[in-house]
Image (cartoon, rainbow, N blue to C red):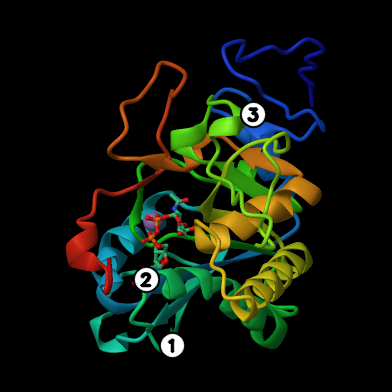
Amino acid sequence: MKAKVCVYFVSRPDVATTTQWLAPIVWEGTFDLTVIDGIYKQQNITVAITVFALGKYVRFLKDFLDSAEQHFMVGYRVHYYLFTDRPDEVPVVTLGEGRQLTVIKTASSNRWQENSLRRMELIEKLIEEKLRNKADYIFSLDVDSKFYAHWGAESLGDLVGALHAWFFGTSREQFTYERRPESQAFIPIEEGDYYYGGAVIGGRLDKVFKLAKTCRMQLEVDRANQIEAVWQEESHLNKYFLYNKPTKVLSPEYLWDDKKEKPSFMKVVRFSQVVKNYAEIRPNP
Ligand SMILES: CC(=O)N[C@H]1[C@@H](OP(=O)(O)OP(=O)(O)OC[C@H]2O[C@@H](n3ccc(=O)[nH]c3=O)[C@H](O)[C@@H]2O)O[C@H](CO)[C@H](O)[C@@H]1O
Ligand SMILES: [Mn+2]
């Protein structure tokens, strides 16, 4: 076989493609999918994905699942773990070969903040009790979202975070980190690398387990001290990633927002938050 060797490769001069700790930042044009699939296909991996649809958020499931079937890790073994208090309202979706879905009945809270932050504890438990030896990688993804284009094995890594669309390119002082020292999620104004979105967390099982467990414990300390971080578990996630750097960072292609205008560096939107009516969908303001 003739190998094509590329010794000098600057495919995206318009954006940063590595972090300061030399983790890749994944953008369209920075990877060769044939090479990447060659690595992961022979490892015969299974990717678990957690989705939470509590309360009225079940309405997002249809588009989420249909579009995931079209674009997410196609050609790999994928196991959805769907947490909901409304199993009867889970839509029927035809899954591709090698893909399965398990519904886990979970109580909903009357506070949306609680539904969002409790994901850490539930992910921790799922990995500990059900996933050992059942999956190699795991992603936790917001359900109020849709896939619009390919999301594949280029996203895999030991510990994976995604750059929040609204904070990409803004200066560190503008990041909405938790700024009160009383919270375990506190990050001083002169610190921080990126603002990561809580909507996408990924990596190898053991790495995500440690992340979820640490954030769950920090959330508990905050609760005991009667303080809730400004963006709940997303604040704790940002604190975690500051001291435990992701080994791969997904560009905003992997965490876009339908409401946001697309700058020229966005060659493709892969996964994006859909427009929602907060007042109507959430159990509390
Ligand atoms: C794009 C992005 O990074 N979004 C993050 C952001 O706001 P968001 O406005 O995206 O938060 P959100 O309302 O989508 O809640 C996060 C997720 O929790 C689940 N859910 C939430 C409430 C509810 O009543 N039922 C339910 O099922 C659902 O899977 C949802 O996608 O901040 C949140 C914490 O404040 C989370 O970290 C989100 O991931
Ligand atoms: Mn969301």
Report if the CB atoms under discs 2 and 3 are less than 8 Å apart. Answer: no
Q: Earlier in the sequence, mark 2 or mark 1?
A: 1
Residue 11 picture quarter? top right
Q: Could you give the CA–CA distance between mark 2 and mark 1, rounded to whole angstroms? A: 14 Å
The disc labelled 1 sits on which kind of residue? Thr
According to the picture, the residue beneath numbered tag 3 turns out to be 31
Residue pictured at 46% horizontal, 43% vertical: 255
In which of the image's four quarters is ligand 1 placed? Answer: bottom left
User: Is the residue marked by circle 2 packed among few (<14), some (14-19), or many (20+) residues within 10 Å?
Assistant: some
In this rendering, the answer to whether 28 lies above or below 258 is above
Which of marks 3 and 2 precedes in the sequence?
3
Mark 2 Cβ and ligand 1 under 8 Å apart: yes
Q: Quadrant of residue 247?
A: top right
Q: Secondary structure at mark 3?
A: loop
Q: Which residue is nearer to you in this view: 206 or 121?
A: 121
Quarter of the figure that contains the C terminus: bottom left
**What residue would you read off at disc 1?**
106
- Percent of width and height locating residue 111: 36, 76
Residue drawn at point x = 33 percent, y = 81 percent: 110
Q: Secondary structure at mark 1?
A: loop
Distance Cα–Cα, label 2 vs label 3: 37 Å
Would residue 124 be visible to someone looking at this image? Answer: yes
Number of the front mark, 2 or 1? 2
Which circle's residue, 1 or 3, is located before the other in the chain?
A: 3
- Expressed as whole percent of the image width and height from the top left, the position of residue 178 reads 59, 52
Q: Amino acid at mark 2?
A: Trp
Pointer 2 residue: 112
**Left or right of 249, for residue 170:** left
Q: CA distance from mark 1 to mark 3?
A: 39 Å
For the N terminus, the image quarter is: top right
What amino acid is at disc 3? Phe
